[in-house]
C-alpha cells in the first residue's frame, strides 16, 4: 500500500464526535467543478488544515459552508443540523463564524462596534426592544462591551484599552485580532480562518496563532478549520490536514504524513 493510500484512510478515526460532516459536496461554476463530490468530516475540538495549490477549491469550500455560495450537490451538517441551504446571515445562530482573507473590518467604526457586529445573532435587535426597552438595550450593550474587552484582553491587554477607538487607528496584527474576536464573540462551535497570515510578518502570524490556540483552550471545544499557504504554520497548529486539488480531496492525515505523500508533493509542491 502506498503512503497516499494509507493517508486516504481518514485519520479522523481518532477524532472525537464529528461536528461538521460534508457529504458529496459539489460547487459548479458553469463548466468548472470548483468542488467535486467532497466528503469532509471535522471532529469536535479539532484544528483541521485545509491545504492545496492555488485554485484547488479551499476558499470555495469556506464559501459554501458559510452560505456565501449555494451547493450544487451534496450536504453539510453542523452539529447534526442540516445547514446545506442555510443563508449566510443565519449561520452564526447555528454556531458558525469565519474570517476572510481580506479584512472585512468597517474601519471608521470603533473596535467595539466591529466586534458587536459578530454578536448580532445573540442580541435582541428588534425595533420594539431597541426603542422601548432602552434599559434592557443599555444593559445588553454594557454586557457586550465587557465581553469584548475580556476577549481582546486575552489577545492583547493594550488592545483591550482601545475598545472605543476607530479600527482604522490599529496596526495590521491588531486588526486581525479584532476580526477574530468578532468571529468568537458570537460563541461559535466552528470557526473558519481564511489565511490568517495574509499581510502579516512571520513573527506576527506565529504570535497570533499562539493567541488563537490559547483562546481556543479557554473556550473549551472550539473547532477550527484553517486555510493557509504558510506550511510551517499548518504543521505547528493543526491536528490533521485535508489536501484538495482541482476540487477533490486527494489526501488527508497528519501534516507530516500528507507532506511526505508523493501525490500531494506532485500536486501541491510541484515535486515528487
Ligand atoms: N465566483 C466564482 N465564479 C467562477 N469561478 C470561481 C468563483 N470562485 C472561484 N472560482 C474558481 O473556482 C476554482 C477554485 O477557486 P478557489 O478560490 O476556491 O481556490 P483556492 O484553493 O481558494 O485558491 P487560492 O489558494 O488561490 O486562494 C478556481 O478555478 C476559481 O477560478
Image (tube, rainbow, N blue to C red):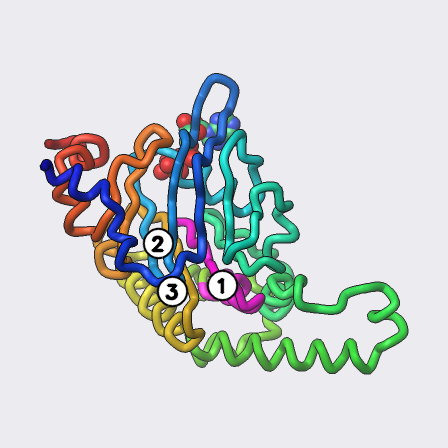
| Residue 32 place in picture, x, y as percent | 44, 21
Q: Position of residue 104 (x, y in %)?
A: 55, 52
Mark 1 C-beta closer than 8 Å to ligand 1: no
Q: Residue furthest top?
A: 31
Residues at badges 3 and 2 in contact (C-beta under 8 Å)? no
Left/right of residue 80 with respect to residue 201 in the rendered view: right
| Mark number displayed over residue 38 | none
In this orientation, which residue lies closer to the viewer: 206 or 127? 127
Q: In this picture, is 254 found above or below 130?
A: above
Relative to 77, residue 72 above or below = above
Q: Position of residue 136 (x, y in %)?
A: 79, 80
Asked if residue 170 shows in the view, the reply is: no
Rendered residue at 38%/67% (across/down) = 212
The crowding category of the residue bearing disc 2, from other C-alpha atoms within 10 Å (few below 14, some 14 to 19, many at least 20), is many
Residue 189's tag is 1
Q: Which residue is mark 2?
A: 197
Q: Secondary structure beneath disc 1?
A: loop
Q: Tell me which segment is drawn in magenta.
A: 177-195
Measure the C-alpha gap from mark 3 to mark 2.
22 Å
In depth, the one of 15 and 95 nearer the eye is: 15
Is label 3 in a helix, a strand or a loop? loop
Residue 45, disc: 3
Do callouts 1 and 2 mark residues in contact (Cβ within 8 Å)? no
Amino acid at each position: 500500500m502506498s503512503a497516499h493510500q494509507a493517508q486516504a484512510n481518514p485519520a479522523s478515526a481518532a477524532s472525537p464526535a464529528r461536528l461538521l460532516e460534508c457529504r458529496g459536496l459539489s460547487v459548479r461554476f458553469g463548466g468548472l467543478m470548483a468542488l467535486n463530490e467532497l466528503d469532509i468530516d471535522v471532529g469536535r475540538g479539532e484544528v483541521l488544515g485545509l491545504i492545496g495549490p492555488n485554485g484547488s477549491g479551499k476558499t470555495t469550500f469556506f464559501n459554501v459552508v458559510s452560505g456565501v455560495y449555494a451547493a450544487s450537490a451534496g450536504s453539510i451538517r453542523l452539529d447534526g443540523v442540516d445547514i446545506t441551504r442555510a443563508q449566510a446571515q443565519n449561520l452564526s445562530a447555528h454556531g458558525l463564524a469565519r474570517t476572510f482573507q481580506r479584512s472585512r473590518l468597517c474601519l471608521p467604526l470603533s473596535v467595539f462596534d466591529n466586534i458587536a457586529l459578530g454578536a448580532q445573532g445573540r442580541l435582541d435587535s428588534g425595533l420594539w426592544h431597541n426603542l422601548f426597552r432602552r434599559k434592557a438595550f443599555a444593559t445588553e450593550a454594557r454586557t457586550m462591551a465587557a465581553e469584548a474587552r475580556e476577549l481582546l484582553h486575552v489577545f492583547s491587554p493594550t488592545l483591550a484599552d482601545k475598545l472605543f477607538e476607530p479600527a482604522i487607528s490599529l496596526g495590521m496584527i491588531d486588526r486581525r485580532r479584532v476580526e477574530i474576536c468578532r468571529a468568537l464573540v458570537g460563541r461559535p462551535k466552528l470557526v473558519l480562518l481564511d489565511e490568517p497570515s495574509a499581510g502579516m510578518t512571520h513573527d506576527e502570524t506565529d504570535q497570533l496563532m499562539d493567541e488563537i490556540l490559547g483562546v481556543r483552550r479557554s473556550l473549551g471545544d472550539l473547532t477550527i478549520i484553517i486555510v493557509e499557504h504558510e506550511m510551517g504554520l499548518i504543521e505547528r497548529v493543526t491536528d490533521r490536514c485535508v489536501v484538495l486539488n482541482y476540487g477533490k480531496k486527494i489526501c488527508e492525515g497528519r501534516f507530516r504524513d500528507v507532506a511526505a505523500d508523493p501525490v500531494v508533493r506532485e500536486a501541491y509542491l510541484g515535486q515528487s
